[in-house]
Amino acid sequence: MPQDPEDFLVDWERRVEQQTMLTAELSERMEQNQASVESRGGEAVVTVDSSGGMIALRLSERAMRLSARELAETVLDTNKRAQAKMAQQMADLVGSLYGPGSETASFISGVYTRQFPEPPEDEEDDRR
């Protein structure tokens, strides 16, 4: 039996309103997302924001004993790991709102994981 046009419009308006609220919540929660990671040797802690930009860097006394090259490599590796963690948090966030198998979750997760892939586990250690 065909749906009444009036019922169709009411249903359509309800779905648009739900989608708008969900999108607003997602946007707000994504904007607030941050990730912090400590370097493997404990020399540095890097925090990135939702765009992957570094917003905080904390260096330990141990960091001061590294050469300039070693310290730079440690910070860069730790930053990459923080970005990858943030990308995973984004995937989890979108999945929790839209469902992990949804097209929206797959698309947004894919964008973040391509932009901020997980670095190889031994990248920092190989340079020392």
Image (cartoon, rainbow, N blue to C red):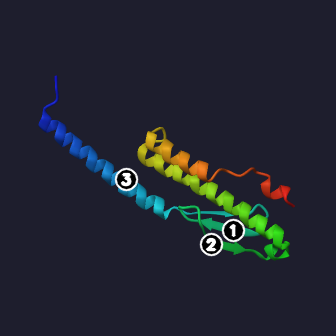
Q: How far apart in space, not on screen, are marks 1 and 3 (Cα)?
A: 32 Å
- Pick whichever, 20 or 36, lies toward us: 20
Q: Nearer the viewer, residue 101 or 5?
A: 5
The residue that label 1 is drawn on is 45
For the residues bearing labels 1 and 2, Cβ distance under 8 angstroms? yes
Give the crowd class for mark 3: few <14, some 14-19, many >=20 residues within 10 Å. Answer: some
Label disc, if present, on residue 23 of the rendered structure: 3
Q: Which residue is mark 2?
A: 56
Which secondary structure, mark 3? helix
Q: In the figure, 29 relative to 13: above or below? A: below
Comparing labels 1 and 3, the label whose residue is closer to the camera: 3
Quarter holding the N terminus is: top left
Residue occupying the point 73% across, 60% down: 77
> What amino acid does circle 2 point to?
Ala
Residue 30 x %, y %:
47, 58
69 left or right, relative to 96: right
> From mark 1 to mark 2, how far is it between C-alphas?
8 Å
Asked whether, in this view, residue 18 is left or right of residue 58, the answer is left
Q: Amino acid under label 1?
A: Val
